[in-house]
Amino acid sequence: METFTLHRGETPLLVSLPHDGTAIPDDIAARMTDAAKRVPDTDWHVGRLYAFARELGASLIAPHWSRYVVDLNRPPDGHALYPGRSETALVPVNTFAGEAIYRAGGEPGAEEIAARVETYWRPYHDALRAELQRLRAGHGRAVLWDGHSIRSRVPRFFEGRLPDFNLGTADGASCSTALQGRLTALLRERAGGAGSPYSHVVNGRFKGGYITRHYGHPAGGVEAVQLELAQCTYMDEDSFDYQPACAAPVQDVIRALLEACLSHGRSAGS
């Protein structure tokens, strides 16, 4: 099985979905607990949520393998993204709920972790980097959108209920002030304005992971933005079932955000 799928678009926008995968290699699954094999910490259905991005002409990359195999949104050296706060590892051994992913004695050691980085992590990032280079060469500029989702309540990571739309730009370092301002204005209108059923925050608990921070370099022609969605906005968080009626208006907001990125990318690259 390939480690990822890549659709090459014709516009200066690349959508990355690094936690969309659910597959677990047999040799790894054999050491995991039954509960962990359900891969509960998947960014469930984000591939379905973002499928329309192809219609916009965007490129789209997503892995086959679960974040339990290796987390594509973590540095390959395992360096912490949020020092002093709880976060998942490059190769996690506990679920978001704090439960063991592996049976006793089945945890991967340093050699296995290094092998997983080479087998699963590096090919995804090599392809992501190459696609950004292709888009930048063809359009003069590229925008990278990193799409995520998470349960609305995860006490290990944050208190209370997470806002519905969580935009991260590494505190403004991964994209231009113009693009962040444009996206923030859209969220105020579509996810926080009068009559909107949604809430939002910019650079709150989720400021952007490794992908946003590493590839976002506005001065170099690549702007990067992360969106973390509260899963209750489009699915049942207990059964993991997708809820099309709830998802449709969420997709409308995401479409508006991606269209703003496209418009910005085209104007900035001209």
Image (cartoon, helix red, strand yellow):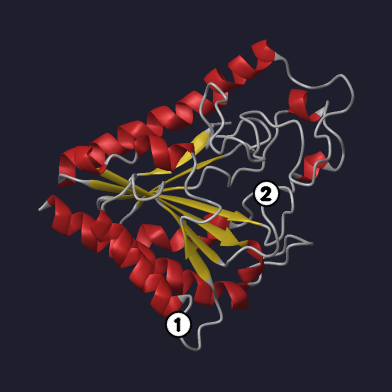
Query: Which residue is the site of mark 2?
Result: 157
How many marks the image carries: the answer is 2
Q: Residues within 10 Å of mark 2 (few under 14, many from 20)?
A: some
Tell me the amino acid under the disc marked 1. Answer: Gly
Quadrant where the N terminus sits is top right
Give the residue drawn at x 76%, y 41%: 95
**Tag 2's secondary structure?**
loop
Looking at the image, tell me whether mark 2 or mark 1 is earlier in sequence order.
2
Which residue reaches farthest front? 84
Give the residue drawn at x 33%, y 54%: 58
Query: Which residue is the site of mark 1?
Result: 193
Q: Nearer the viewer, residue 255 or 156?
A: 156
Q: Position of residue 82 (x, y in %)?
A: 56, 39
Which residue reaches farthest left? 270
**Side of 142 where 154 appears, left or right:** right
**Side of 18 where 57 appears, left or right:** left
Quarter residue 46 falls in: bottom right
